[in-house]
Amino acid sequence: MILRACAALFLGAALVCCSANSGPRSAGSHQLHPWTIPGTLRWADGEDIDNLNPLLSTETLVNDLSSFTMGYFFLFDDKGNAIPSLCLKVPTKANGLISADGKSLTFRLRHGVLWHDGKPFTSADVAFTVKTILDPRTNVLTREGWDLITRVDTPDAYTVIFRLKKPYAAFINHYFTPVGNPAILPKHLLEGVDINRNSYNSLPVGLGPFRYVRWDRGNDVVMEAFPRWWGGAPKLKRVIFKIIPDANSVFVALQSHAIDMYVRVPTSQYQSVARTAATRTIAHDVTSYGHIDFNLKNPMLADPQVRQALARAIDVHLLWQKVDHQAGYLACTPISHLSWAYDPNAPCYSFDLTAAAAQLDRDGWKLGADGLRHKKGATLRFDFAGNTGNPGLDARVLMIQQWFKAIGVGLDYTRYQTNRLFASYAAGGIAATRKYDLASYAWTVAPDPDLTNLVACSRISPLGQNYMAYCNPEVDGALQDALVHYEPARRRADYILMQEIMARDVPFIVLSQRTDHVTFNDDFTGVNPGPQLMFWNPQDISN
């Protein structure tokens, strides 16, 4: 049986919760808590860092840090709307910045922008960065969208024109936006160097309101306000990211006032964390989804019958209740319920251990005396890869192990440091190189709901972030059609078809569409997370 169901919590709008242990701050008061450092924000999220260049990193954390320090064409505000940053306007056909044939995109750049070393930012930096991304020697995570650029024209210092092979409706996801990873690089510092191994990756020079001053590996990353930022001096003087790669330790640091902010509090903790004295918690829907991936290069998991049976043996609703405490949105598709392309009828498999066992029986997997299923010398035993310091995932896997055991499937659990689990293919990342059978983490879907880089045949790593090695020509066809047409109705039909096919194929299981939580010292104002970006307005945060 296929179940169609959705359950919602925190629909759309952000919810601000005041801690029960903290009274409201008096209006107009400038008195800070004794532990608050004037002009300084200290924060953590339970992860460590692979490198600080978003061009080469897979981590959401690095995108967060880059929101403070790097430069982008566009940002996305608290409603998920694209807002100009280094570009003056978002290109559309209506404003003439997209050509009639859809194959030329013009970007008008902001004047008076400086790199953190004082050099002027110009169109030459944009052209250089595109060239670097397209260089096959660059260990970029993906060239999705970028590989459509045939030429970059720079008729003057403040105009850039991308000439494309074909229309690209999802350009806003990739062409220099924080959710698309690559930030604009300084040509004057990086031309002629090997970007993969350059010291720049440890302390990038950027265009954002803050500049990097130190990365003390294993300890912290320090950023200071850049007073010559084009938008004006930020309200904070210093931002310190504390490297605390364990969720429980981050909670202790918040309680002891060693940090001011805990970002993306795990759902297993958020209720307890929100009760921390003298803090506020914001719960906000995001376009991220938690999931369990199958490695389809494993011959056993390449069999859709096995994947479907395993999907029936995971009680997603109970995991949502017990581990996530009903935070988020229970759905069967990775495309957010906030999106115009969301399919409310996307199916998923209902929890049924009897049906799961019967399906494995029909597929020839016979239960042995050891309690495991065997077929032609193979044994249904898998390894589940996760990251250390993640008590929510630990609890999830423990429950899944018991359900799998009930149907004769073994499940081991290997935990890796976050930066090793999510390192690039070139760096031997566990997920990227498919050194796992099952793995669980979260992806963030970009504002335009194109999933090409995550599920297309052409994007199987190392060519993209399709770490599952999933390949279905029907899905590819729908994705390709949606990208070459700008008409919303046609694109929505393509994405609905894609969601229905993937639900049938089950290369991954959607656990939930996430509601994120950030808890912070109530001396701070200006914290205003959006569905795509935690820090889209870091210059406005103050204490």
Image (cartoon, rainbow, N blue to C red):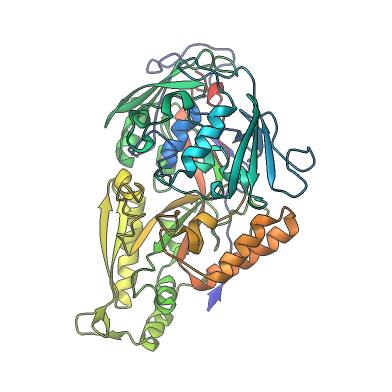
Camera-side residue: 170 or 344? 170
The picture places residue 140, in percent across and down from the top left corner, at 43, 44
Q: Is residue 150 left or right of residue 263?
A: right
Q: Is residue 61 left or right of residue 416?
A: right
The picture places residue 102, in percent across and down from the top left corner, at 72, 48
Q: Residue at x 35, y 54 (%)?
A: 393
Residue 378 in the image: above or below residue 451 = below
Q: Quadrant of residue 51?
A: top left
Residue 21 in the image: above or below residue 358 = above
Task: Work out whether residue 527 can be spotted.
Answer: no
Residue 527 in the image: above or below residue 352 = above
Residue ranking furthest to the left:
370
The picture places residue 148, in percent across and down from the top left corner, at 58, 50
Camera-side residue: 25 or 87? 87
Residue 419 in the image: above or below residue 355 = above
The picture places residue 239, in percent across and down from the top left corner, at 42, 22
Task: Work out whether residue 429 can be spotted.
Answer: yes
Total labels: the figure holds 0
